[in-house]
Image (tube, coloured by chain):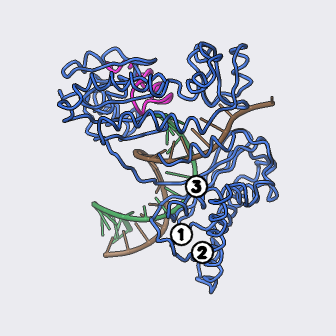
Chain colours: A blue, B brown, C green
DNA sequence: TCTGGGGTCCTAGGACCC
DNA sequence: TCTGGGGTCCTAGGACCC
């Protein structure tokens, strides 16, 4: 199948670490990690030593004794990431941003203005380098999936164009894990069948892939390996859930620990929902125990909620229920709360205080409305004076957190 | 001193309805 | 005595991505 190659995938190289090297020239050419307790990003020089994001800082230092840790300039990541993606928007409005440092663009029909897709990709790289100061890799192909693989092959700081008709030969010898959707588990299962390259994958019957990996994944991989990818570049996507979690170290599984933590998490989640005029019907709590084994408990309510207090109470009920089911677990290492089944809510909604224990619509509606009004007042104070001006529980949570709040805010941000 | 935090999507079983 | 089939929704767990 030969589609005209008009889809670009742009991916900033080792983004956070590259920003640090841009801001501080003495870090250039050196192994750099952003973070401290945990590695949030690593420069290519650090990656060469095996340093990876998500790795405990201690382990990273063991692997790479010369590693320089920097706390991170999160505002700058936001600004520079936006600036780089905006360069793409100068060539087409059809830009789908998929993270702070990565986007697809479809430049079909822009030849007469800017030249071929390959020319455009070259201009994007040049402009991001000179105007923003960062290295960026580009892949150009006829489908999103192939464009993404091409940009990965192009890294670091390169450009790869997959010309129409050359797709099979391009894919043939690439390792299966370059494919979107093939992680450690799928890779191992495929290896068990002697499948290591995308070419081998393409020769494997769709039926055996489905047996090996499940219906959806098997079918998708069979299509992608044969370069069948119908997905269009989508400029807008709607959020399907909003959540927050916090690693706790090791804490006893008692009310005095989980109640304040859940209130703090519920506050983060509910205030973000309200800021987007969203509310959700399904509340999920996640608990990870000391052995890192995690469980979830969820409940779907008859009406969508976005009030902090109600969300916190439901979260507590769910956590209590899970702890009863796992009463042998004495220690927890993480708590999370998320809300899904989202609905767009008019600004002046009234929330019903529907708890787990009573589905009766008690005459407490006024209480729900009062809470919601109080939440909105708190939102307004924060808008003016900052998030820490007022709040629940954050003091009780303790001041030493694994990840800086600025990082969380970056991750929460609407793209 | 063993593992962050934000998400998406899929699967499987069970309840429930017609 | 034995016994349908399709569809939707909910819950719990898990793979995967950045």
SS of the residue under disc 3: strand
Write down the residue under mark 3.
A338
For mark 1, give the secondary structure: strand
- Answer yes or no: is residue A194 visible: no
The answer to whether residue A265 shows anywhere in this view is: yes
Q: Which residue is mark 1?
A: A301
Chain of residue at mark 1: A
User: Mark 3 — on which chain does it sit?
Assistant: A
Q: Could you say which quadrant of the image residue A2 lies in?
A: top left
Other residues around mark 2 within 10 Å, as few (<14) / some (14–19) / many (≥20): many
The numbered mark, 1 or 2, whose residue comes first in the sequence reads 1
Q: Dot 2: what SS?
A: loop
At a point 69% along the width and 21% down the height, the residue shown is: A60
Residue A234 position within the rendered picture, expressed as x and y whole percent measured from the top left:
32, 45
Where does the image place residue A126, in percent across and percent down from the top left?
Answer: 38, 21
Depicted A243 relative to depicted C3: above or below: above
Residues at marks 1 and 3, CA–CA distance in whole angstroms? 14 Å
Q: Earlier in the sequence, mark 1 or mark 3?
A: 1
Name the mark on residue A354.
2
How many marks do you count on the picture? 3
Q: Are marks 3 and 2 in contact (CB under 8 Å)?
A: no
Q: Chain of mark 2?
A: A
Region of the chain picked out in magenta, as a range: A178-200
């Amino acid at each position: 199948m030969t589609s005209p190659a008009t889809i670009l995938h742009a991916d900033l190289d080792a983004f956070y670490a590259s920003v640090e090297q841009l801001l501080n020239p003495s870090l250039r050419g050196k192994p750099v990690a952003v973070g401290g307790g945990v590695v949030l990003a690593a420069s290519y020089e650090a990656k060469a030593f095996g340093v990876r994001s998500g790795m405990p800082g201690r382990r990273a230092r063991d692997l790479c004794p010369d590693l320089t840790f920097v706390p991170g300039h999160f505002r700058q990541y936001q600004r520079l990431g936006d600036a780089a993606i905006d360069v793409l928007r100068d060539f087409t409005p059809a830009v789908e941003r998929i993270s702070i440092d990565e986007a697809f663009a479809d430049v079909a029909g822009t030849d007469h203005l800017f030249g071929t897709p390959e020319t455009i990709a070259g201009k994007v790289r040049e402009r991001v380098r000179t105007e923003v100061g960062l290295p960026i890799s580009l892949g150009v192909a006829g489908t999103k999936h192939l464009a993404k693989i091409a940009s990965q092959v192009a890294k670091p700081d390169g450009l790869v164009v997959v010309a129409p008709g050359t797709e099979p030969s391009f894919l043939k010898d690439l390792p299966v894990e370059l494919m979107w959707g093939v992680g450690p588990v799928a890779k191992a299962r495929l290896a068990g069948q002697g499948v290591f390259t995308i070419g081998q994958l393409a020769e494997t019957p769709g039926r055996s892939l489905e047996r090996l990996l499940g219906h959806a994944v098997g079918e998708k991989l069979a299509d992608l390996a044969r370069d069948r990818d119908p997905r269009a570049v989508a400029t807008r996507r709607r959020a399907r859930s909003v959540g927050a979690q916090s690693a706790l170290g090791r804490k006893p599984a008692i009310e005095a620990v989980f109640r304040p933590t859940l209130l703090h998490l519920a506050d983060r989640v509910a205030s973000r929902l309200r800021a987007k005029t969203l509310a959700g019907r399904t509340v999920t709590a996640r608990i990870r125990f000391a052995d890192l084994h995690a469980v979830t408990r969820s409940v779907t309510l008859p009406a969508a909620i976005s009030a902090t207090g109600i969300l916190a109470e439901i979260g507590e009920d769910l956590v209590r229920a899970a702890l009863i089911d796992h009463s042998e677990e004495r220690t927890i290492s993480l708590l999370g709360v998320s809300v899904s089944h989202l609905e767009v809510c008019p600004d002046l909604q009234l929330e019903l205080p529907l708890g787990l224990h009573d589905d009766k619509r008690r005459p407490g509606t006024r209480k729900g409305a009062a809470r919601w009004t109080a939440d909105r007042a708190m939102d307004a104070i924060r808008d003016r004076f900052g998030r820490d001006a007022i709040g629940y529980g954050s003091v009780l949570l303790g001041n030493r957190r694994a990840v800086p709040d600025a990082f969380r805010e970056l991750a929460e941000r609407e793209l």
